[in-house]
Image: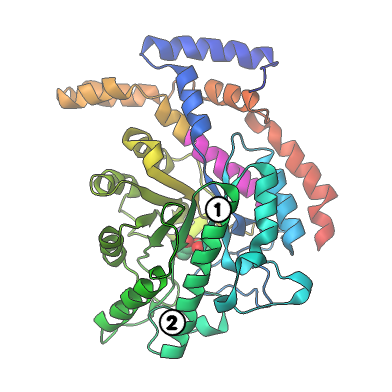
């Protein structure tokens, strides 16, 4: 922890500490707890989910729109951009990799079913040098064999290929965890589905279930790798039926002791992922999240400090942050990509801080005694408490710029590095 030199930030923090103290909230404790929460920062914001294979065209019903200059085009650029982002984000976090970010030595490329730990050695070195954890995702899209379906394919050759890919990714995830001494979450998301009304909803799901069983039959160390499964309501081109639906994965996860991953862009627009967390955690030890911002659909906009994010953060804190495997998932190619990472990560942390600064016992007591007018009043008044003063102090002790001061560094990096890439 760095000593805070900025006198104004120090003074504002002292006043905030007093104000929160009056309602029984310990700001120092909130800061300490926030420092313990690591967020998995998704590598794919840096290059519009392109990856390092020959085919960088995005498929699978997801889209990165925009053409802002400076997309990372290779591992060196992506790693440099991640470094830049992390230097502006307080705390120690994890990096979330996709399998299509394998790094092949001397052009010795292999297809996805033949991937091995050695193809991710450079990422492990990168993470080790920085004390970061790594999470992982098999990539079941942006590939000629994913044109129709992957793990639910009716073509047994295709299905076998993707099962082997999943198995290869389990071995890589275990390698990450062993090398880094930190658990690796391996998340499975597939885009399979139908544009129009299917004749048979059962068979594709039965094949997906069998494929997952075969992937998980690999002998891997369950104490090191936490497998998650991510559902979706629909994607572009598969609007009528998604094989990996919420009910499918919630049941599959519960039955096989896996993590169920909730992406808040993957439900009907009026459904609240915040509301689902407590229900999941009454029946499972842990739940995994992809925090994103769906605008009208699963658009994967940058996470803001908005009501939905704050409500999710509130549930993370109330239920216990150690029970939630937290990752971000957005990809915006229309703005500076490093700024997108920093805004999203800092906003997630701001939302967590706001939740940590709530007098949760007092609020629960008002709810339990049905003093609902006072509950509403207090929840509203709390919105204008000085969370910003605590946030600025948190940034300073973590030696990253407070307020908007970090953006100057983005501007400089854009001029000195990004602009020269195109
Ligand atoms: C690239 C990610 O794996 C992907 O976004 C997935 O997590 C998802 O949310 C698809 O809509
Ligand atoms: Mn997701």
Crowd rating for badge 2 (residues with CA inside 10 Å; few <14, some 14–19, many 20+)? many
The residue under label 1 is 178
Q: Position of residue 285 (x, y in %)?
A: 31, 46
**Residue 226 lies in quadrant:** bottom left
Lateral position of residue 58 relative to residue 306, left or right: right
Crowd rating for badge 1 (residues with CA inside 10 Å; few <14, some 14–19, many 20+)? some
Task: Give the secondary structure at mark 2.
Answer: loop
For the residue with label 2, is its CB less than 8 Å from the closest atom of ligand 1?
no
Q: Position of residue 151 (x, y in %)?
A: 41, 78
Is residue 140 visible in this depiction of the protein? no
**Residue 332 lies in quadrant:** bottom right
Magenta residues, start to end = 335-351
Q: Is residue 344 magenta?
A: yes
- The image's colour scheme reads rainbow
- The residue drawn where x is 55% and y is 46% is 181
Screen quadrant of the N terminus: top right
Q: Position of residue 152 (x, y in %)?
A: 37, 80
- The residue drawn where x is 46% and y is 35% is 351
Screen quadrant of the C terminus: bottom right
Q: Nearer the viewer, residue 139 or 88?
A: 139
**Residue 364 lies in quadrant:** top left
Lateral position of residue 257 relative to residue 82, left or right: left
- The residue drawn where x is 46% and y is 89% is 157
The mark that comes first in sequence, 1 or 2, is 2
The residue mark sitting in front, 1 or 2, is 1
Q: Nearer the viewer, residue 118 or 150?
A: 118
The residue under label 2 is 149
Q: Nearer the viewer, residue 6 or 175?
A: 175
263 over 352 or under it: above or below: below
Lateral position of residue 404 relative to residue 257, left or right: right
Lateral position of residue 355 relative to residue 404, left or right: left
């Amino acid at each position: 922890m760095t000593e805070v030199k900025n006198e104004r930030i120090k003074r504002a923090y002292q006043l905030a500490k007093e104000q929160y103290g009056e309602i029984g909230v310990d700001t120092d404790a909130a800061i300490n707890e926030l420092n313990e929460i690591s967020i998995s920062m998704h590598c794919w914001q840096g290059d519009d989910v392109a990856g390092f294979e020959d085919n960088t065209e995005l498929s699978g019903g997801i889209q990165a729109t925009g053409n802002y200059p400076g997309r990372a085009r290779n591992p060196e650029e992506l790693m440099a951009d991640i470094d830049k982002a992390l230097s502006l984000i307080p705390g120690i976090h994890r990096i979330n990799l996709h399998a299509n970010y394998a790094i092949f030595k001397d052009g010795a490329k292999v297809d996805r079913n033949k991937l091995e730990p050695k193809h991710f050695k450079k990422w492990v070195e990168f993470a080790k040098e920085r004390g970061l954890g790594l999470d992982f995702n098999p990539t079941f899209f942006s590939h000629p064999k994913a044109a129709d379906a992957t793990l639910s394919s009716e073509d047994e050759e295709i299905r076998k290929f993707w099962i082997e890919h999943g198995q290869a990714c389990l071995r890589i995830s275990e390698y990450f965890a062993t090398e880094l001494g930190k658990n690796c979450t391996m998340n499975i998301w597939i885009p399979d589905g139908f544009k129009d009304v299917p004749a048979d909803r059962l068979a594709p799901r039965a094949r997906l279930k069998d494929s997952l069983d075969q992937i998980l039959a690999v002998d891997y160390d369950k104490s090191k790798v936490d497998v998650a499964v991510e559902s979706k309501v629909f994607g572009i081109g598969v609007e009528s039926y998604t094989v990996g639906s919420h009910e499918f994965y919630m049941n599959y996860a519960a039955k096989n002791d896996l993590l169920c991953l909730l992406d808040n862009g993957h439900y009907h627009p009026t459904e609240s992922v915040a509301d689902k967390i407590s229900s999941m955690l009454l029946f499972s030890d842990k739940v995994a999240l992809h925090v994103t911002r769906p605008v009208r659909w699963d658009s994967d906009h940058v996470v803001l400090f908005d009501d939905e994010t704050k409500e999710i953060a509130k549930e993370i804190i109330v239920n216990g942050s150690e029970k939630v495997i937290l990752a971000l998932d957005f990809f915006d190619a229309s703005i500076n990509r490093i700024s997108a990472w920093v805004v999203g990560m800092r906003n997630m942390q701001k939302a967590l801080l706001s939740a940590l600064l709530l007098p949760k016992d007092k609020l629960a007591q008002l709810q339990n005694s049905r003093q609902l007018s006072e509950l509403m009043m207090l929840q509203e008044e709390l919105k204008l408490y000085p969370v910003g003063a605590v946030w600025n102090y948190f940034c300073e002790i973590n030696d990253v710029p407070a307020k908007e001061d970090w953006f100057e560094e983005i501007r400089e990096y854009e001029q000195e590095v990004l602009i020269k890439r195109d």
